[in-house]
């Protein structure tokens, strides 16, 4: 195991090398095949969710419990002293004295990095504003590998809210290691931010920008759809203008590759027709389950138990 993963923070997917990513994916595969119910006995996870979550929080907590560890934390910042004005730095400095590892989500970009300055316990970023969601990326990569039997050289379409969607930002950066052909599909106002496109150019990754799903879905091995992030819009009228532009339906699946898998970090709102759920292309529920094994792998690795 890369010894450097012990006690490490995971704030951005760029904190991990390609080898470290592959190592975590292999650990997750091993844990999926063979559970380790006592691996993290006597270890405590602090699960701090300053912003709503279903999958990330509950899979982190289940991951810890199924490895024999314990969980403290909160799912609502209003029940904490943050509601009395306590700073994030002070909160994390204190909680770091109670727990061995901290998983957190916070609405502010850069909050996870700030938390890491407050404690020497590993901080695992479960999403900071529109910035990064690196543990989601690990489970996305795990799922891509599971469904396509490889990570390199795939045609991957990223669709939906590419401006505010932190999952696509992290995923795109991780994919730089795996020579993909990328397609970005979004309304003009929600396209991938320019600095990410510059990163792709610097790394000589082929990509193109599109407004309609049907322009590229037939070429894709993976179609990664995201929700329009209503909570990130400063002006609700801007949200109203784009909210129904994107909807993947059965009609889009005519003529697609047999191996195409549709992924979605979830939750979905109305961009993904539930009639797709029963097709062989739908894989988003299995994708969410994989979060459990990837987060187990990460907890085991940063706590030096694997
Ligand atoms: N994919 C994801 O982050 O889901 P939650 O917001 O439910 O955690």
Image (cartoon, rainbow, N blue to C red):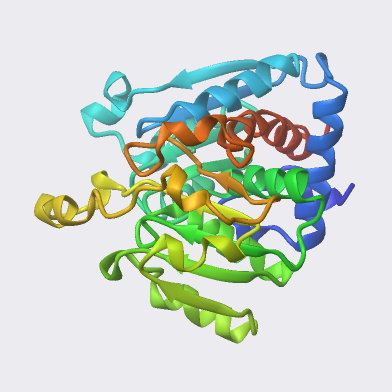
Q: Is residue 197 left or right of residue 283?
A: left
Quarter of the view holding residue 209: bottom left
Return the x and y of residue 227 as percentages of the image width and height. Answer: 37, 46
Is residue 237 visible to us here?
yes
Q: Is residue 255 above or below residue 294?
A: below
Where does residue 189 sit, x and y in percent of width and height? 26, 68
Camera-side residue of 290 and 27: 290
Q: Count numbered badges in the picture.
A: 0
87 or 2, which is in the foreground?
2
Q: Residue at x 29, y 71 (%)?
A: 188
Q: Is residue 215 left or right of residue 151?
A: left
In the rendered image, residue 6, in percent from the top left (x then y), is placed at 78, 43
- Where is 222 relative to 175, above or below? above
The x, y position of residue 147, in whole percent, is 74, 45
Q: Nearer the viewer, residue 131 or 161?
A: 161
Where on the picture, by quarter, is residue 68?
top right
The C terminus appears in which quarter of the rendering?
top right
On the question of residue 98 being in view, the answer is no
Identified at 76% across, 35% down, the residue is 297
* Residue at x 38% of width, y 54% of height: 130
């Amino acid at each position: 195991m890369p010894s450097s993963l012990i006690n490490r923070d995971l704030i951005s997917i760029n904190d991990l090398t390609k080898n470290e990513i592959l190592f975590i994916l292999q650990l997750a595969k091993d844990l999926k095949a063979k559970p380790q119910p006592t691996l993290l006995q006597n270890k405590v996870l602090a699960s701090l969710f300053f912003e709503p979550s279903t999958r990330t929080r509950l899979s982190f907590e289940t991951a810890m419990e199924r490895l024999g560890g314990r969980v403290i934390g909160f799912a609502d910042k209003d029940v904490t002293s943050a509601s009395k004005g306590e700073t994030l730095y002070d909160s994390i400095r204190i909680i770091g004295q109670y727990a061995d590892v901290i998983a957190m989500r916070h609405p502010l970009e850069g909050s996870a990095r700030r938390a890491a300055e407050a404690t020497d316990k590993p901080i695992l970023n479960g999403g900071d504003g529109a910035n990064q969601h690196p543990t989601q990326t690990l489970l996305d990569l795990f799922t891509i590998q599971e469904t396509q039997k490889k990570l390199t050289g795939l045609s991957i379409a990223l669709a939906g809210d590419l401006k505010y969607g932190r999952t696509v930002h992290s995923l795109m950066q991780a994919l730089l290691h795996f020579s993909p052909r990328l397609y970005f599909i979004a309304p003009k106002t929600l396209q991938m931010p320019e600095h990410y496109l510059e990163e792709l150019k610097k790394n000589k990754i082929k990509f193109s920008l599109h407004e309609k799903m049907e322009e590229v879905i037939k070429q894709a091995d993976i179609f990664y759809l995201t929700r329009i992030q209503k909570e990130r819009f400063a002006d609700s009228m801007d949200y109203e203008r784009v909210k129904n532009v994107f909807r993947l339906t059965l009609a889009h699946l005519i003529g697609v590759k047999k191996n195409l898998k549709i992924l979605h970090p979830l939750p979905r709102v109305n961009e993904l027709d539930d009639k797709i759920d029963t097709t062989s292309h739908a894989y988003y529920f299995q994708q969410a389950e994989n979060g459990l094994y990837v987060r187990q792998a990460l907890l085991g690795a940063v706590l030096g138990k694997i």
